[in-house]
Amino acid sequence: QGDLIMSGALEIGGKLPVNTDGGCIANGEPIGASGLRQIIECALQLQGRAGDRQVPGDPRTAFTQVYGAPGLSTCTVLAR
């Protein structure tokens, strides 16, 4: 896992971009709205409308995961 991170694979130009909008560290944790924020970012990426954060190439699939108390987790896969 450390090697994957250090290789740059998880950066916007990497093989597996993660948190392209900076995630909760950059956007804060608005409790129930975090999952919606993730879906909006993924939709922008898939539409090619993410501006400076745009993943290069032609992204066709996106994935979100959000966890909330008590023990609730939601995963979403978006594709075009």
Image (spheres, grey):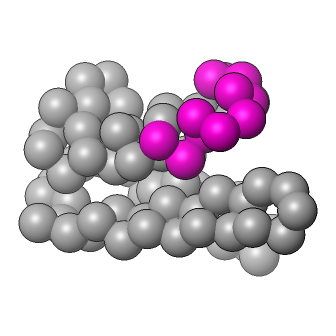
Q: Residue at x 34, y 63 (%)?
A: 62
**Quadrant occupied by the N terminus:** bottom right
Q: Is residue 59 above or below residue 30?
A: below
Report whether 34 appears left or right of 2: left
Q: Is residue 14 above or below residue 71?
A: above
- Residue 43's x, y, as percent? 26, 46
In this view, the residue in front, 31 or 18, is 31
Q: Which residues are magenta?
A: 26-36
Report whether 76 appears left or right of 42: right
Q: Is residue 9 visible?
A: no
Q: Residue at x 43, y 68 (%)?
A: 76
Report whether 58 appears left or right of 3: left
In this view, the residue in front, 16 or 50, is 50
Q: Residue at x 63, y 23 (%)?
A: 27
In this view, the residue in front, 49 or 67, is 67
Q: Residue at x 21, y 60 (%)?
A: 59
- Residue 3's x, y, as percent? 74, 72
Q: Is residue 7 above or below residue 46?
A: below
Q: Is residue 44 above or below residue 26?
A: below
12 part of magenta stretch: no
- Residue 80's x, y, as percent? 11, 66
Q: Is residue 49 visible?
A: yes
- Residue 63's x, y, as percent? 43, 66
**Quadrant in the picture for residue 57:** bottom left
Chief secondary structure of the magenta portion: helix
Specify the farthest residue to the right: 70
In this view, the residue in front, 76 or 71, is 71
